[in-house]
């Protein structure tokens, strides 16, 4: 999934200037964004109050949507640079195509991890014959300077490690949790986990005090460190925690996101992450000229044109609150 906002504006992010070095409980409200004709997402990152969580730089939550009589997700070919995309489903299927020739149907609790590196393009769509419900999250991970020009590649992992406790099951999507490590390639110290709680369960997840964390609510009713978190909202937790108390009011689904605070200062515009306005301008020119990002074959429709760049130059300068 992509940022299809035709009025895209640059975001400055990264750097440790606004990382909270102690435990906090900062509830982030989503911004609603329309993707195509039938998919609306709740955008949690970047947020006016919080730009990143570790290397996690973009978080959309969508559904559950009834698409039985709808086309469902239809995201035409578009480019990426300087990041990884993480596609995560609770319901439905998404067909991924990219300029490397990858063709993969992604199903619930399977990891689709696309590393854009220097340049890639892809499309995402609901198959013509699809399930009634579509529900999931799309996330981006910023690549550090040492790896942001890596060769693009795509990984699909259907079997992921699971951490269990009474009333709790946590699938490790990326990075490591409680000794269980995802097979997905990570370029920074990071964790992403899908947590399922049964109604009435109380549990504590082990955390790394050097990481900053946030929890995205996917479904049900749960309390995270005593704070009610409803579906489509996200609780930022800061750093300095060794464990996280969870309590399920009903059956609930959460996503735990965390990582070492991202030191580098970034510029994010549309579907690109760079280090300067010049990086972004070059990426836009290359996409509009049909160079560098390759071609997605098999999608029934034209690629998405890039939005215009703002007239006022913007330099990466750390996090903005």
Image (tube, helix red, strand yellow):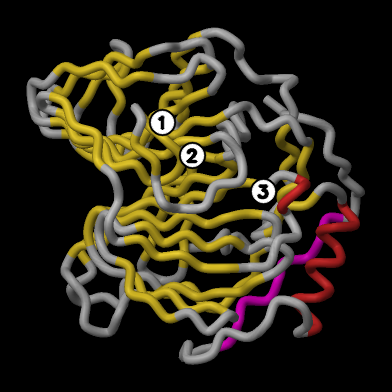
Viewer-side label of 1, 3: 3
Specify whether residue 303 is painted magenta.
Answer: yes
The residue at the point 28 percent across, 69 percent down is 93
Q: Which residue is mark 1?
A: 234
Q: Secondary structure at mark 2?
A: strand
Query: Alpha-carbon distance for marks 1 and 3?
Result: 23 Å
Relative depth, front residue between 220 and 39: 220
**Number of numbered discs overlaid on the protein picture:** 3
Residue 217, position in %: x, y? Answer: 31, 35
Q: Is residue 203 above or below residue 36?
A: above
The residue at the point 56 percent across, 31 percent down is 53
Q: Which residue is mark 2?
A: 44
Residue lying at the far front in this picture: please name it: 179
Task: Confirm or deny contact between disc 1 and disc 2 (CB under 8 A).
Answer: yes
Which one is earlier in the sequence, the residue at label 1 or at label 2? 2
Which one is earlier in the sequence, the residue at label 1 or at label 3? 3
Which one is earlier in the sequence, the residue at label 2 or at label 3? 2
Which picture quadrant has residue 222? top left
Magenta-drawn segment: 302-310
Q: Residues within 10 Å of mark 2 (few under 14, many from 20)?
A: many
Residue 254, position in %: x, y? Answer: 29, 35
Side of 1 where 296 appears, left or right: right
Q: Is residue 108 above or below residue 19?
A: below
Residue 146, position in %: x, y? Answer: 76, 48
Where residue 143 is drawn, which disc sits there? Answer: 3
Side of 171 where 280 appears, left or right: right
């Amino acid at each position: 999934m992509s940022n299809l906002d035709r009025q895209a504006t640059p975001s400055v992010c990264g750097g440790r200037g606004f990382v909270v070095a102690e435990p906090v409980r900062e509830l982030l409200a989503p911004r609603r964004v329309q993707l195509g004709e039938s998919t609306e997402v709740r955008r949690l990152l970047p947020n006016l109050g919080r730009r990143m969580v570790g290397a996690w730089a973009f978080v959309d939550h969508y559904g559950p949507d009834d698409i039985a009589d709808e086309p469902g997700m239809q995201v035409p070919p578009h480019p990426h640079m300087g990041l990884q995309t993480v596609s995560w489903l609770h319901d439905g299927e998404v067909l991924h195509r990219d300029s490397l020739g990858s063709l993969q149907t992604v199903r619930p609790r399977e990891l689709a991890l696309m590393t854009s590196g220097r340049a890639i393009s892809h499309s995402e769509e609901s198959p013509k014959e699809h399930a009634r419900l579509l529900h999931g999250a799309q996330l981006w991970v910023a690549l550090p300077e040492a790896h942001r020009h890596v060769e693009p590649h795509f990984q699909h992992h259907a079997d992921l490690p699971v951490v269990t406790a009474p009333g709790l099951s946590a699938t490790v999507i990326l990075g490591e949790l409680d000794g269980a490590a995802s097979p997905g390639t990570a370029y920074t110290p990071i964790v992403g986990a899908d947590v399922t709680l049964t109604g009435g369960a109380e549990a504590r997840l082990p955390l790394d005090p050097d990481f900053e964390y946030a929890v995205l609510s996917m479904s049900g009713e749960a309390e995270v460190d005593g704070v009610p978190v409803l579906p489509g909202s996200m609780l930022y937790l800061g750093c300095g925690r060794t464990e996280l108390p969870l309590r399920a009011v009903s059956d609930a689904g959460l996503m735990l996101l965390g990582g070492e605070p991202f030191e580098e200062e970034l510029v994010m515009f549309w579907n690109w992450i760079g280090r300067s306005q010049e990086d972004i301008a070059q990426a836009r020119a290359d996409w509009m000229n049909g160079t560098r990002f390759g071609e997605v074959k098999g999608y029934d429709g034209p690629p998405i044109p890039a939005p215009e760049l703002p007239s006022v130059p913007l330099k990466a300068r750390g996090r903005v609150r």
